[in-house]
Amino acid sequence: MSPALEILLVAVLTAAACALPGAFLVLRRMSLVSDAISHAVLPGIVIGFLLTENLQHPLLLVLAGASGLLTVYLIELLEKTGRLREDAAIGLVFPALFSVGVLLIAQLADQVHLDTDAVLLGELAFVPFDRLQWQGIDLGPRALWTMAGLLLMNVLLLWLLYKELTLATFDAAAAAVLGFRPILLHYLLMGLVAVTVVAAFHAVGAILVIALMIGPPATALLLARRMPTYLLLSLLIGALSALPGYGMARVLDVSIAGSMATMVGVLFGLVWLLAPETGLLARWRRHRRQQLDFALDLLLLHLLHHEHQPAATVERHQDTLPAHLNWTSERLNIILAEGQRRGWLQRKGPEVHLTPAGRARATQLVETLAPARSP
Amino acid sequence: MGRPRSYLLTFGLAGILLLLTSCQATLPREDGRLRIVATTSIVADLARQLGGEAVEVTALMGPGIDPHLYRASEGDVTRMQQADLVLYNGLHLEGKMGDVFERMRALGRPSLAIAECVPDSLLLRASGYGGVYDPHVWMDVRRWQYAARCVAETLARMDTARATFYRNRLTAYLAELEATDAYVRRQSATLPPDRRVLITSHDAFRYFGEAYGWEVHGLLGVSTAAEAGTADVQALAEFIVARRVPAIFVESSVPERYLRALQEAVAARGFSVRLAGPLYSDALGDPGTPAGTYTGMIRTNIDTIVEALRSIATP
């Protein structure tokens, strides 16, 4: 496999592995947990170093993972009290843990190049150069195996507990009544998040993991109405942002992870704008359509009301209509054109007349608007 | 879900198209030159000095880039993939990237950590910690000679046809380093020993201090995660006032705001210290400027230091 292909494959696997727990995080308003963990692992790393005096020792990663678990445990503990919102719980826990790490470095290890970047965070670009070998056979990039393992773990656990987790996410009280122990489920989910985040940080770096955990589910949430569609779309959108992201990195010769994270944002922006029904554009067009419908109905009623009055010729004249309805003549022309297109209006010289269909519509409107008057 | 899917399909296809159109085949090497990828500009300069026109050197980190803040680009992957040899400083200067190079070597792809060519007995330990050493070995020109020999040996071994060529270049370069070393000693000697006090923003000059008889203090430690504590600033300010140090030095790859805090702490004690520099510590200056080569950088640094400290301190 070429390095480019390996990088892409790892990115797609990372996207899929992160999107699944990320989807639940977004629903639980805990999106920033992944960002919080990226800071809160510092004390684990420092303690690992103080114990082993070696920057490459695996204990540093194990303790980083333990810090991640401690972070989500504390957040969940605070949130469970019900006296703090999710965001405040996150905002309290990770700065506290991060500062413990900074203090430890300043007191005990400030001559050592010791930070999260140097010890934990991987780099997607170097994935093809860090390979696994078994008895002289090349097994491909190490990160490929890590991410595939994480994906498998996440798919398996979420598949087994799908029903319980979904219920606990949307209605913890109902889940408790049904005997599902929502608190336990939340701890389990958050544990899954912590393990995924720390292992993925190690394989591909922080920014990509944070972006892939939040961006694709947030985008999917704009499109999906049902849980299975939402999860599936999260997976798909995550994987899709990897492709143009890589292309952009190649064309501009910039960071691959950075470009992919940018594409996650761009995709969200596009969906925000263009999504059918919920997109900004669709909403704007619907709004325009409603305005036009309303104006047209107003015109029909106006014409019907004056149809048999002596002043009818004046009232339906194209020069008096703008003043009476408080429209500009350009607006009148747009509305007239729409009315003619729908077959409700016809123009006779300078006058505007209702067609039979238009009269029927107007009469029906009067009946729906003022049912009391019609008998 | 028909319509969203078609949007997604469009994005996906656009991505795949982008990818396909931008894929290029690996170019074969037609001129027989060794392709070398170096991490920092300082390592790259050593490779150019020793390899001359027989090698093609690419530095991953440009001038003025703090190695801690480097992020690999897409092109770097291709450059590393096509490299015959990867040269890096080592001793954790490049962080996790160094681990990657180490594993590449284990899998048979040539890479060399040049700072690790310096004998262990000459390496300075990060205070108190076992296997962790200060990576800034290039600050002492004599220690850098070990690195030079190591690189020349590696080149001669990989490109046996040009072995003599590399050895001749090494001899010439060692002489240049010798002259540079002598120059730093001469310049240092123009100041009385008690005025040889170098205060910089981070701890990059310990080898320099040890080799040329300077007392060095860095405001920040080696790690970028640790901030300067108030006590550190106060202690260093006391020291500057007590020793009447006229100038402290900014580094080209480290922001100067920490030193400004130190300057103000000194001013609060009724003494004034000048911000001088910049000194080049982790990266060379721009190509074409005097500090654009390693020897030029060392000479520029000592000139800047001596010049700034020669002036008598004024309270």
Image (tube, helix red, strand yellow):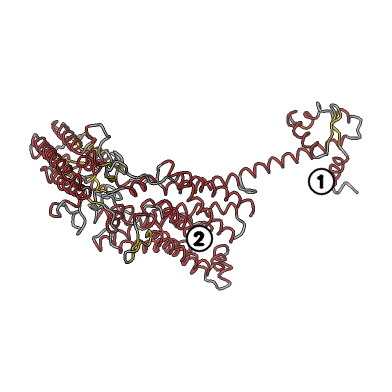
Q: Are marks 1 and 2 on the same chain?
A: yes
Residue B308 falls in image quadrant: top left
| Closer to the eye: label 1 or 2 | 2
Q: Position of residue A124 (x, y in %)?
A: 39, 52
Secondary structure state at the residue bearing disc 1: helix
Q: Position of residue B103 (x, y in %)?
A: 29, 57
Q: Position of residue A28 (x, y in %)?
A: 52, 59
- Nearer to the camera, A363 or B297: B297
- Residue at mark 1 to residue at mark 2: CA–CA distance: 50 Å
- Vertical comparison of B28 with A214: above or below: above
Label 2 environment density (alpha carbons within 10 Å; few <14, some 14–19, many ≥20): many
Question: Dot 1 falls on which chain?
Answer: A
Residue A150 falls in image quadrant: bottom left
In the rendered structure, which disc, 1 or 2, sits on the residue that comes first in sequence?
2
Question: Dot 2 falls on which chain?
Answer: A
- Nearer to the camera, A305 or B286: B286
Q: Position of residue B254 (x, y in %)?
A: 28, 41
Give the labeled residue for mark 1: A369
Q: Quadrant of the N terminus of chain A?
A: bottom left
Say left or right for B252 vs B139. right
Give the labeled residue for mark 2: A20
Going by the numbered disc 2, the residue's amino acid type is: Leu
Say left or right for B194 vs B233. left
